[in-house]
Image (spheres, rainbow, N blue to C red):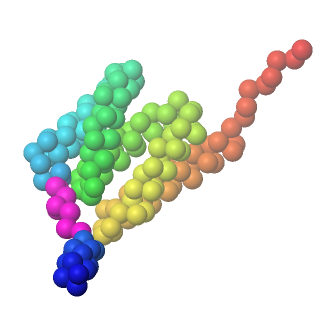
Amino acid sequence: MRIAVISVLLFVLTGCGDPPAPPPEKDETTEPWYAQTIGRVNEITQLAEEALKNGKPDEASALIQQGEPFTSQLLSVLHPTLAAMTAAADLDSLYARMLYSNRHYEWAQFLYQKNVARWKYWKPATPETERRLKEAEAQVEDCIVKTSTRKLPAMPKK
């Protein structure tokens, strides 16, 4: 009887140990697709900027929309790289400038605020990330001023 009780206790106690450690997470930022996607987003941003400078806003807009899924893919990994964050911020900043130029200040402000959040919480902070943070904060402030001083269209009289 004692042997049965002791063996049951040993069986129960061995089941109470620490669970096995989970396998280490795969660092997707070291995969070839990650660097290729960063390059693609940078290329799309450059092409969109050129299209905008050449007076082709519709082409620039299409390129920006083409780049957005890539930025989402880059930022969805566990610890995105600074290069990925910069590529995403540059694309968002270009889109925000387009919206701003079309007087869509609220939407531009939203995109600039995304950049504020990106750079405010980026660790470790660098002179470049600090510069980008200050630039984004100034752009948000400018949108706020534009929104608050804008005259709304008059309502038609009944």
Instruction: Name the quadrant of the C terminus.
Output: top right
Where residue 86 sits: x, y (%)? Answer: 29, 51
Q: In this view, does 151 lie to the left or right of 58?
A: right
Name which residue lies at 28% across and 55% down. Answer: 78
Q: In this view, does 84 lie to the left or right of 92?
A: left
Q: Residue at 74% of width from left, 26% of height from top?
A: 153
Inspect the magenta stretch and tell me whether residue 26 lies in it.
Answer: yes
Location of residue 11 (image quadrant) = bottom left
Q: Nearer the viewer, residue 130 or 27?
A: 27
On screen, residue 4 versus residue 148, left or right, reads left
Is residue 2 visible in the rendered image? The answer is yes
The spot of residue 113 in percent (x, y) is 49, 50
Of 8 and 131, nearer the camera is 8
Using the image as rendered, state which of residue 6 and residue 93 is in the foreground. 6
Q: Tell me the quarter of the image containing the N terminus.
A: bottom left
Q: Please, which residue is most extreme toward the bottom here?
A: 2
The magenta stretch spans which residues?
18-27
